[in-house]
Image: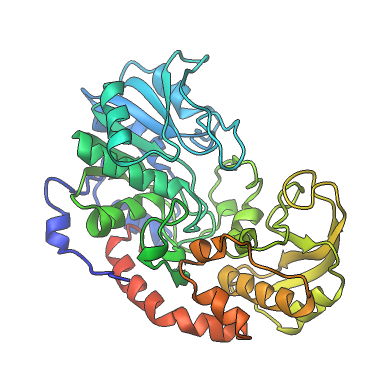
Amino acid sequence: MNLSRRNLLAAGSAAGALTVTGAAAAAPAAAARGNGHRLRTGFERLAEDGYAALHGQRVGIVTNPTGVTRDVRHIVDVMHADDRVHLVAVFGPEHGFRGTAQAGGSEGRYDDPATGLPVYDTYLKNGGPLADIFTASGVDTVVFDIQDVGARFYTYIWTLYDCMEAAQLAGKRVVVLDRPNPVTGRGALGPVLHKEFASFVGRQPIAQAHGMTVAELARLFNGEFLRAPVHLETVPMTGWRRSDFHDVSGLPWVPPSPNMPTPDTALVYSGTCLFEGTNMSEGRGTARPFELLGAEGIDARWAEAANALDLPGVEFREAYFAPTFSKFQGTTVGGVQVHVHDRDVYDPVHTGVALLVTAKRVWSDFAWRPDHSIDRLTGSARVRTMIDAGAGADEVAAAWESELAVFRGIRRHYLLYR
């Protein structure tokens, strides 16, 4: 995996130092111990501090529809109307700044009708070309504020990585405004990416369910993976505990992407998204994407086989559905709906692998996608080849434990909330 932690003192140098604005560095840790303070996002703390961290800077922001205040105003609209911050550009990720594009799409370059600000497209851009966009935009500081869902293959965290790399090349500063991991930050789960399988659904060797916030990931990227550290500052939250799910945050849920409609989707996504790498539907085109899984010809035997495993915190219901788009569009298929009844013990990644194992055993037409995209999702060929060889979910999970233990050891050095 080539996971070797850089000297932490070097990571804290002027080029890559962590700056906590608006409060002492210990404040997030104290709040995380449960002192009763209401959660404050990174943006809320930045605004309460009068945007001091952005004073005198020409600012560009990487964001999407999730970049909202508690009263669901978009932060671009809020910052644009505030004389204390000089906002000059917006950078849109996959799905776009205003969120109008489906998976694998973006909105391109345009001027935002609401603010008149130029919107630049970052999707699938990195390195020199993205650095050139930052230079052309005239910004001094690139701000990042997007809601993540805690899975390695959710592309916004790699937009963050690419923007950090490009900002370093362009001599720009990066400020990351933190938001909660909606499925908690209790721990890392699942296989760790092998570098030869790197792609935009996993640039660097982190766990499939990383258990980190975006500010923590930014610190990890800066300390471990960037060729040269960028001038990074983070604005942590206060009042967030690592055991908190989204529903205790008091924050509105805005779908981070078209097929992430609810926090329930995020809860299962880091496991059931693996079905994107198969010939089965992952529920796109239904009201419950990633909770509904199936294919034409599957019957009750799959739910029976999955329930027989007695996986912690979850049960499976025989289900039938007809996707309105994506795989099996307009065709009624059979499968399962994933019902999590105890999220505190539920392991989404182990559950996802168990569902792959049982699907292959009960449905004779099961197949991996010919492009072996399952390997990019799991981070290596191991999950696919072990399942093909007849391994069970426990055996597959045991095979990634040593690498996961190494990642967990590295991860803990970059956590902001204890």
Name the residue rendered at 56%, 37% in the picture: 105
Q: Is residue 370 visible?
A: yes
Q: Quadrant of residue 22?
A: top left
Q: Is residue 313 visible?
A: no
Q: Position of residue 386 (x, y in %)?
A: 56, 81
Residue 294 x/y as whole percent: 77, 62
Q: Is residue 189 above or below residue 157?
A: below
* Residue 176 to residue 406: above or below: above
Foreground residue among 36 and 5: 5
- Give me the residue at 46% from left, 72% from top: 191
Left or right of residue 377: residue 178: left
Q: Residue 366 or 403: which is nearer the viewer? A: 366
State left or right for residue 63 relative to residue 161: right
Looking at the rendered image, the quarter that the C terminus falls into is bottom left
Q: Horizontal and vertical percent for residue 51? A: 30, 29
Residue 187 at x, y = what percent? Answer: 44, 69
Name the residue at 71% across, 83% down.
Answer: 310
Quarter of the image where the N terminus is located: bottom left
